[in-house]
Image (cartoon, rainbow, N blue to C red):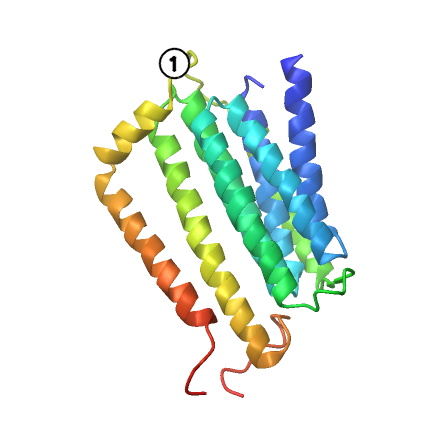
Amino acid sequence: MDNLSNYVLISAILFSLGLFGVITRRNGVAVLMGVELILNSANVNFLAFARFGGMNMSGHVYALFVIVLAAAEAAVALAIIINIFNNFRTINVDDVSELKQ
Amino acid sequence: MADIVFWFVAFITVFSAGMVVTSKSLLYSAYSLLFTFLGVTGLYIFLWADFLAVVQVVVYIGGILVLIIFGIMLTNKITSVNISHTSMQKGVGAVVAIGFIASLGYMAISSPWLQAANTEPAETTASIGRLLLMDYLLPFEVASLLLLGALIGATTLSRKDEDG
């Protein structure tokens, strides 16, 4: 627990799993979950490097901004997904390739 | 003892993140995401980021996760509990993910990280507030504008059209 490489390793695994989810999932909400995993892994990295780089609080502020961006992104993405569902009756991202019905 | 807790938290985080991306049921994915967020919160506490840990619980679990579950419920029949969702191109995804884990993991383990000797800070919240209102005032204001824009955008996008 007092080793930077442990945190970087966990964050790398989280990032890869999130990427796997974004690539393989077809449901729009599930793709969003993959994006959340990626953002969380970025946050773990920010805080780990802040903690082991002399407790630089700028890393915490950046992590706070990442959380703000994640909240805004989730709200807008879910609005878009619900809109897609109302128009197409599906949220499979592969079936939504037309710009106009 | 702390080491055991750390590896337990790390295991919960990674295992439930794996469940998020591999589970057949969308709701199980959402609930696994809850444990991933909790695990990441534990990691924040190990990283002495107590304020960020609380924010993580409030915003991610209280906000984003509830929003995601609402999204699942609104885009499916509410009565059907078994909301399945399939994955495609698992081969490509697995190759990319394993490649990333291998390369980033090798980098994380083999790099000679320079670690500054430091002690646990007495408080983090006061320093974060001071930084937000002095060094990062402009990004802070831009973030508030972004949140306002996201709020208006999400409302506009998801309301029903009056004129068809």
Q: Residue at x 33, y 56 (%)?
A: B148
Q: Is residue A85 above or below residue B151?
A: below
Q: Chain of mark 1?
A: B
- Quarter of the C terminus of chain B within the rendering: bottom left
Q: Amino acid at mark 1?
A: Ala
Answer left or right for B84 relative to B118.
right
Front position in the image: B107 or B59: B59
- x, y (%) of residue B129? 30, 30
Q: Is residue B94 above or below residue A4?
A: below
Q: Residue at x 57, y 49 (%)?
A: B65
Say whether residue A22 is visible.
Answer: no
Front position in the image: A45 or B137: B137
Please give the residue where the numbered disc 1 appears in the rendered image: B122
Front position in the image: B28 or B155: B155
Say what secondary structure mark 1 lies in.
loop
Answer left or right for A80 relative to B103.
left
Q: Residue at x 69, y 45 (%)?
A: B32
- x, y (%) of residue B94? 70, 52
Q: Is residue B105 above or below residue A55?
A: below
Q: Residue at x 76, y 60 (%)?
A: B81
Number of residues whose C-alpha sits closer than 10 Å to that of mark 1, classed few (under 14), some (14–19) or many (20 or more):
few
